[in-house]
Image (cartoon, rainbow, N blue to C red):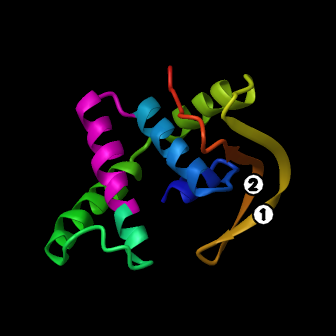
Amino acid sequence: MVKQLYLSGGIDLKSHASMRHLSDFAIDVCEPSFMKRQFLKYHCWKSAEKLHQDVYGSGNFEIDQYADLIKNIEKYVHEFSKINRPLLFMKFKESFIDVKSSHVVVKKTCGTVKLGGVVLKNEYDVFTDEKKNLILDV
């Protein structure tokens, strides 16, 4: 969902860390409600990460927790699909292209990415420094 959203604006997120950071960024710039931002970032995204880790057999949760995790992920997908893309891409440009960031590296490129059988054009590759926390001031 996150990778697809950014690719629709020509931005290819190159790592899990960049997806996590830029998911938070999208929520912070496009969601006015503080409580909803917190819910999406700290409950819904964390649910997706837990399920992702479970693929590798980590056993982070009990089997009876699946329903809540899936509900949180569905809520995240639903809310994320409503993000104001023009606003997001304008804020992305202002925050990471027009200004250098110490933790987000944006490289101009010209290419395509195949995602889910669809070929999308990308103009920027994005990498993040996993060791630094993303602090947003938008």
116 over 68 or under it: above or below: below
Quarter assignment of residue 91:
top right
Q: Residue 81 in the image: x percent, y percent? A: 41, 53
Give the mark nearest the N terminus, 1 or 2: 1
As measured in the structure, the alpha-carbon distance from the residue carrying label 1 to the one carrying label 2 is 5 Å
Cβ atoms under marks 1 and 2 closer than 8 Å = yes
Q: Residue 94 in the image: x percent, y percent? A: 65, 24
Q: Residue at x 54, y 36 (%)?
A: 88
**Residue type at mark 1?**
Thr
Q: Residue at x 32, y 36 (%)?
A: 37
Tell whether position 102 is magenta: no
- Label 2: few (<14), some (14–19) or many (≥20) C-alpha neighbours in 10 Å: many
89 over 94 or under it: above or below: below
- Which sits in the foreground, 82 or 37? 37
Please tell me the numbered disc located at residue 50: none
Quarter assignment of residue 76:
bottom left
Which region is colored magenta? Answer: 31-49
Total residue callouts: 2
- 85 relative position to 80: left or right: right
- Which sits in the foreground, 27 or 57? 57
Please tell me the numbered disc located at residue 112: 1
